[in-house]
Amino acid sequence: MTELLVTIFSTAFFVTVIRTSTPLLLATLGGLVADLSGALNVALEGQMLVGCLTAVIVSVYAPWYVAVVAGVGAGALLGLVMAFFALRLKADIILVGFAINIFASGGTVFALSLATGGDKGTSINLVSKAIPPVDLSFLSAIPGIGPFLTAMFSGHSVLSWVAAFLVFAIWYFLYRMPWGLWLRGVGEYPAAPEAAGIPVNTVRTWSLIVSGGLAGLGGAQLAMFNYVGFARDMTGGRGFIALGAVLLGARHPVGAMLAALLFGAFEGLSIVMPGLFADAPAELIRMIPFVVTILALILFSYRAQQALRAKSVAKT
Amino acid sequence: MAPLLEAIGIGKTYPGGVVANDGVNLTVSAGEVHAVVGENGAGKSTLMKILFGIERPDRGELRLDGKPVSFTNPREAIDAGIGMVFQHFSLVPSFSVYENVVLGSEPKAGIKFDRRQAIEAVRALSERFRLHVDPLPPVGQLPVGQQQRVEILKALYRDARILILDEPTAVLAPQEVEELFIAVRALVEQGRTVIFIAHKLPEVLEISNRITVMRAGKTVGEVGASEVTEKSLATMMVGREVALRVDRAATTGETVCEIKALWVKGEVNQTLVEDLNLTVRAGEIVGLVGVEGNGQAAVLDAISGLRPIAQGVAYLNSISVGPLSVLERRGLGLANIPEDRIAQGLATGASVAENLVATRLADTRFVRRGLLDLKAIKANAEQLIERFSVRVGGSGAAVGTLSGGNMQKVVVARELSERPKLLLVSQPTRGVDLGATQFIWRSLTDARDAGAALLLSSADLSELLALSDRLVVFYRGKIVAAFINQDDLTPETLGTYMLGLATQTQEEMRLALK
Amino acid sequence: MSTQQALARQSRWASIRKEAQRSITALLIALVVAFIVVLFTSKTPFEALNIMLTAPISKPRTIGLWIDDVAKLTVTGLAFSLVFQARQFAMGVQGQVYVGALASTYVALSPLGPTYAAIPLGIIAAMLAGGVWGFIPGIAKAKLGANEIVSSLMLNYIAIELCNFLVRVQLYEKPGVLTSTPFPKIAVFPPLFAGTRIDLGLILALVAVLVVWFALYRTAWGLKLRLVGHNAKFAEYSGIKSTVIMVSAMTCAGALGGMLGAMFVQGQTYGKLTVMFEGGLAFEGILVAIVARSRPLAVPVVALFYGYLRQGAQLMNIRTDVPAEVIGVVTAIIILLVSSSFSMPGKTWLTGLFNRRADAAPVAVEGAPK
């Protein structure tokens, strides 16, 4: 038990959590943008998965950053497809989302097989690239806490820093820029922006595109940093966990970050635990993030109900 | 000089074949208040949607300043200087007043939304046009009258030269209507033009300069407000003399419903109804008067079982309904015609027959051992369709395919078919044409004459005055006045109490509350 | 009145025809896309297509594979239809299949396994387990408002890992082999046709169709469920306890999912529990339910068509260089097209051609809201 605590409070574990949280956070931010515009994006999982594969394949032929952009583009394209069917052709957005998930699950394996001439399920024969870590080892020069800072902050993926910046950027966009006002207005009461001449469907389309792009970015991180290479269904439910994280984060970017960190921490735990408890069953450890998500969701819904009551009692 | 705004020969047929506008002409001069009147379904709303770019006409032409224009969306209409205040406000509840006003045309500082400038602009506008409202609180917390001002400010912020007000008085108490009219006059003084959609004639005559009358999708004439009387205008509107008069109850019987010290709380525990005492007897209609949201709906919901009773008791034939389920209350003879038939009163995707038995799925005539008796359900539907002359292809047709009036008849048929002892009625004729209104009013008085006790809530004071035997006025969840309905009772008197400007003493109320 | 009824019947037929037309059009578009994909990706495209379209009926054995798939697709389609009719988006059939399979495995490998009780008890145990798995997201939503999509998806992953775990540590035949001990012969569904995989599961599926249809259209519970699905507020107003209906619908759908689990592991195909046995079939119930518009009687028909395609793709996978996953693409396209209000290609052009006639005709059915 002490070993576990030592591990959890180590800088190495912190680095692990940042790594596991980053794809989740990116997908959660994607889910948040769509959700606030009133379009529930249940296709995050599929968009991430397609982002993974696209990034992996492109990275074989192009520099890593081009591959990342390609991953974003693939996710965004699926977001556009979603918008087209859900907004233009009036299909139920949840069904459209699941169609995209089914498409992604089969389509990625299919496409990988084509790209590699028959590989089924993994990209071991592809020499794909990784996203470089950001080296901050110069921080060691700071006397005293230098080595600690290096251990904490050096070696994270570029995209981890990007994700942290995006939390701020999306907050700024939503609450400080006019288009954020539009987006939130469209999500809360579309008749109002409509009457003010704001093109409601265009706003939703863009938010679905951005949402898909963010999920694709999360996919790129997953397949070019957390793992290097593609495997069938490698997102393993992260897109769905992200959906839960949106709700748990009280539909706010900072909340989304905290929720993603929480789920990331449990995923990190499931990574370090086999090393500590050799006989702990791997399946049950892999189950942890899902159990935590469902418990967190239930607890959060319960708390939200209670808070609503408590607040009103205080008022009267 | 060319008129400011002209609509010539406008025609609009909706997919599905409903002809909403068929050769409509409208000529509005600068600086006037121009009323467009007509009964529900005459095509006023469609015309306004066309003027504002929400709908596109199939035929005809719009001219602004003598030049032909065509709007493909509201944005273009707004840019051309047309502003619209809908009957259902287009405000985002959690946004502050200033955010709502500037939404879509925000002042910017670089890429940033310039909040300070927005607040300043709203303050300046509300000063200039005497539309006082605090720019900072979220609009969801404001009373209806203030929300309407926010809507008007929104249009003015966009520099609307022409302001279209769609049934603006429908949600207001008489005194609030006066305030609105003061603002409208201020607008005209400052060179704006107002188009005023309405069907309440006294208001139209008071505020407008010229009046265009519509009937069945056509314009039937344009007159000066000073040239006509209420009566001649009404004749133009419906094409025949109408007298929507209703006889008062002949006799009243036993007490059917008795409410004692009733408290009702809302979702967030706020008090909706406070210490209410009321008695309703067989064979009478008691009207619940009040600006929307002052507790009338909550009382009806508490009696029907859609909201819990927080404190106190409501008796139906001496049985306390508090602990009973919705179905058990219905079993005691309670029926309920809800405010919004599509949102609450019907399942539009289900068939007419299914809708007609939805409230009686515990009744052995239709359900035995959990199994549906399809024959009985169909027979029930066919009998009610016949009796209430619902126009429908068959009992298996989906309710959603019916017209508004026929949908409401399905609700009325279901609720009246069991000879209710206590009937709760909310907005029975909202959005229903005149023919169906007459039919529904007669159904309600027939139920009364058959011995039912009725509690009626309506936003339309004339409906309340026409139907009720007694009236109680709600203000902030309490009864502040009670009247026996006599010819000398006016909307203005009721309005004073609706706004809380006056309160009757217990003594004054006693006679009408007994 | 009788003419009115005739009219109503006519319009009903017209709308059924319209639905069928749309579904077939969607299927054709999806097939064309599949053809194009195969054309560009396969070295032997025509052979691949030929296999995809004809192989399922080429031999009794492949027909058996097809019909076996149809039975399973029917059950998952019914489970989704049930929750969709109540307008819930519980996505938990996959998890229910795994827990159902676990439950029936425990029955089959218990002392009861070698008795005649193994089959009925296995099915019942599976339905109970699946029901519990369906009940959890239902009650969490009813009591706490927890989003049922997220919670049911999480339960899917939990069930899969649970199954993996139990197979590895407890149910394995030999250490290191990820399958359970084969069930006693008497605990495995008897085949209906010797030498094929068609077994008792098909009968279960057909019975399930009738039961679900009867429950939805002939019982008060079904009418309440449909009314909740149409308009939950109206249901509350009518005195229907919509949360009870919602939870019971999700639980019943869960029981169907659980039964599907028993059909997998107790069926001729497996006769034992293996990890990841379901292969994504459960989610394809979404497609079946959507194309069937959640009508139980239409579900097996849709399953028949879709199962054929699916089997064709599997055989193409085995015999040619085209991966079976192409079916995922086809599935997605069909869902997208059927659930959206697309119009047939060229329809605009046609209406343009017959503009005057189209204008004059009354469009009663077109104008009806969904």
Image (cartoon, coloured by chain):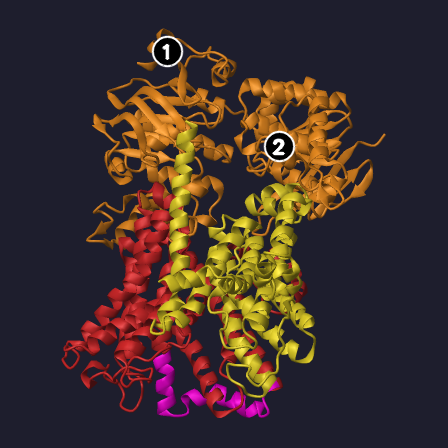
Chain colours: A yellow, B orange, C red
Residue A3's image quarter? bottom left
Give the chain letter at badge 1: B
| Residue A81 in sight | no
Is residue C44 magenta-colored?
Answer: yes
Callout 1 secondary element: helix
In the image, what residue type sits under mark 1? Met
In the image, what residue type sits under mark 2? Val
Residue B509 has which mark? 1
Estimate how packed mark 2 is, as few (under 14), some (14 to 19) or many (20 or more) residues with alpha carbons within 10 Å.
many
Mark 2 or mark 1, which is nearer the start of the sequence?
2
Q: State whether the magenta stretch is mostly helix, strand or loop.
A: helix
At x 52%, y 81%, the residue is A122
Estimate how packed mark 1 is, as few (under 14), some (14 to 19) or many (20 or more) residues with alpha carbons within 10 Å.
some
Callout in the foreground (1, 2): 2
The magenta segment is C41-69
Is residue C199 magenta-colored?
Answer: no
Residue B386: percent from the left, percent from the top? 36, 43
Between marks 1 and 2, how big is the CA–CA gap?
39 Å
Residue C99: percent from the left, percent from the top? 30, 69
| Outermost residue, front side | A143
At x 50%, y 80%, the residue is C325
Give the chain letter at badge 2: B
Horizontal placement of A86 versus C273: left or right? right
At x 66%, y 49%, the residue is A199
Horizontal placement of A98 versus A207: left or right? left
Q: Which residue is mark 2?
A: B97
Horizontal placement of A95 versus A303: left or right? right
Residue C119: percent from the left, percent from the top? 20, 77
Q: Nearer the viewer, residue B421 or B405?
A: B421
Q: Nearer the viewer, residue B309 or C223?
A: B309
| Residue B71 in sight | yes
Q: Nearer the viewer, residue C270 or B369?
A: C270
